[in-house]
Image: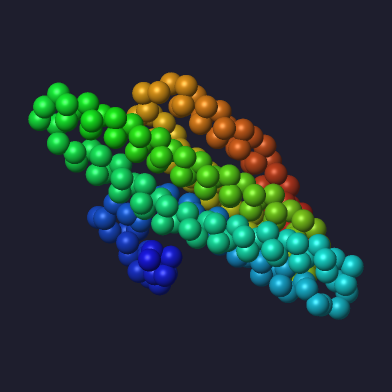
């Protein structure tokens, strides 16, 4: 399983001539790191003196961040699987008209799947960004810088996943599908650059 790789093995894979893991997997890893750092700040806030008033909120944040971490970790494999499907579709036989037609249908289906996978990753990364705000507000000041790293990691994942959506949309012939996914992505991205900076500055003000 790709999620069981060591960091070194994963990085070696990214650096190699192999097609996977690639940018989509890296986007998911970035988001997962952001979620993990939110969990870290929440864990350092729970049960600590002076933070009794935010105990329940910290528990809620921790539960959400751990869900996000699990989903984004799964997204690493999803990205590899869908990329492999795209590559396999291009390798289908194309000698006869029937084969060409079948190949074209499978390529389009694979590209649609390869658009939806990073779009879901982008959705999850946006949730990481949003969740980093409350933990930056209430988290243990001794580790509050990690809330800043969390929002940056989530933002990197979001923008990276967006690139994978854009590249796959470019090959889709179904204009209605392509326009719908592009619109959904633009909605996800809207305002996130500003929010990311606001959270970063909030964290900085507490250092």
Can residue 153 be seen here?
A: no
Can residue 127 be seen here?
A: yes
Q: Relative to residue 14, is residue 18 drawn left or right? A: left
Q: In which image quadrant can residue 86 be found? A: top left
Is 102 situated above or below 147?
above
Seen as rendered, the residue at the extreme front is 98
Is 196 situated above or below 13?
above
Q: Relative to residue 190, is residue 10 drawn left or right? A: left
Q: Relative to residue 194, is residue 7 drawn left or right? A: left
The quadrant of the image that shows the C terminus is bottom right
The number of numbered discs placed on residues in the rendered structure image is 0
Residue 133 image offset from top left, x and y in percent: 74, 53
- Residue at the image position 37 percent from the left and 28 percent from the top: 172
Residue 49 image offset from top left, x and y in percent: 86, 78
Residue 98 image offset from top left, x and y in percent: 17, 26
The quadrant of the image that shows the N terminus is bottom left
Residue situated in front as seen by the camera: 204 or 3: 3
Q: Which colour assignment does the render follow?
A: rainbow
- Residue at the image position 41 percent from the left and 57 percent from the top: 77
Residue situated in front as seen by the camera: 205 or 150: 150
Residue 30 image offset from top left, x and y in percent: 52, 57
């Amino acid at each position: 399983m790709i999620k069981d790789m060591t960091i070194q093995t994963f990085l070696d894979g990214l650096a190699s001539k192999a097609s996977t893991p690639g940018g989509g997997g890296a986007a998911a890893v970035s988001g997962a790191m952001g979620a993990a750092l939110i969990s870290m700040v929440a864990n350092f806030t729970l049960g600590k003196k002076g933070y009794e008033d935010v105990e329940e909120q910290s528990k809620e944040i921790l539960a959400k961040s751990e869900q996000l971490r699990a989903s984004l970790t799964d997204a690493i494999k999803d990205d590899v699987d869908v990329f492999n499907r795209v590559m396999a579709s291009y390798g289908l036989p194309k000698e006869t008209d029937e084969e060409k037609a079948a190949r074209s249908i499978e390529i389009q289906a694979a590209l649609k799947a390869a658009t939806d996978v990073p779009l879901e990753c982008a959705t999850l990364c946006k949730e990481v960004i949003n969740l980093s705000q409350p933990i930056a507000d209430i988290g243990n000041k001794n580790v509050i810088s990690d809330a800043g790293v969390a929002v940056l990691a989530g933002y990197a994942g979001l923008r990276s996943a967006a690139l994978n959506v854009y590249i796959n949309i470019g090959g889709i012939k179904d204009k209605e599908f392509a326009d719908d996914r592009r619109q959904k992505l633009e909605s996800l991205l809207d305002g996130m650059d500003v929010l990311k900076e606001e959270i970063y500055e909030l964290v900085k003000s507490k250092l």
